[in-house]
Amino acid sequence: VRPTWMRSLAMAVWLLGVTGAAAFATPRALQQALVQPIHWNLRSTYVVCQEGAEMNVLQQMSASFWEAKRAQLRAESEARLRELDEFVAREQALTSAALGASAGVPSEPSSAELSQVKLELAQQKAKVEQLEAALAQQALNAELELQKSTAYWIAKVAEVRGQLPAAAAGEDATNLEKKSVLKGPRTGTTGFANCP
């Protein structure tokens, strides 16, 4: 079997020879009759060669496709088998743990464990009581600070009123009462209501 390029070269040489001989030896109708089948033969030879190359490529692709498909299916089946083995191992471990736990655990806790739990509970209760006492003390301190601050500001207002003339003091007190009634409680920089 000759390679494709050698067949096409031999065909081209033969075509030149036949065409040249036909052009000088025969009339025009004979030239067309000889040239027409040659073109057809060249085209069919080319198509056959192309189909052969395509078939080789398709066969190679088909073989590699099926090999890849086979490898993929094997990998999937192995993964499923591993997963099934893991499920079996888990089920056996859970079953053995459940059977061991029900057979080995006494129905009532021992006195040592019970006393340990009671001791921990007492410690937690003591901590809770300490925290509650600290919280109550903090609330008491906050209330005392509030009262001290209120007393300070009341004293300051009284001091300022004492420094004002008598007529302005009466008028100012009336204005302050009106403002506090109209605006409602006011929060200053100290955070306390009704502070000037």
Image: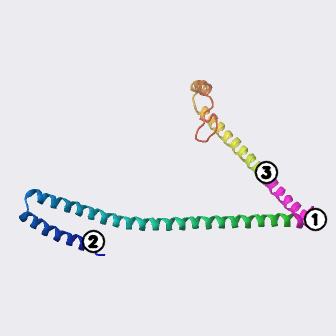
* First reached walking from the N terminus: tag 1 or tag 2: 2
Compute the Cα span from label 3 to label 2: 101 Å
Indicate whether 194 appears above or below 62: above
Task: Report the residue marked by disc 2.
Answer: 4
Q: Residues within 10 Å of mark 3 (few under 14, many from 20)?
A: few
Residue 168: % across, % down = 56, 26
Q: Is residue 150 left or right of residue 65?
A: right
Residue 14: % across, % down = 17, 70
From the image, state whether disc 3 or disc 2 is nearer to you: 2
Q: Quadrant of residue 24?
A: bottom left
Q: Which label sits on residue 194?
A: none
Q: Quadrant of the C terminus?
A: top right
Q: Is residue 113 left or right of residue 16?
A: right
- Tell me if residue 172 is in the magenta stretch: no
Is residue 6 or residue 146 the one in the foreground?
Answer: 6
Q: Main secondary structure of the magenta part?
A: helix
What kind of residue is marked 1? Ser
Is residue 90 or residue 31 the one in the foreground?
Answer: 31
Task: Report the residue marked by disc 1.
Answer: 111
| Residue at screen point 27% across, 62% down | 44
Is residue 82 or residue 19 the one in the foreground?
Answer: 19
Residue 115: % across, % down = 91, 63
Q: Is residue 90 left or right of residue 47?
A: right
Task: Report the residue marked by disc 3.
Answer: 132
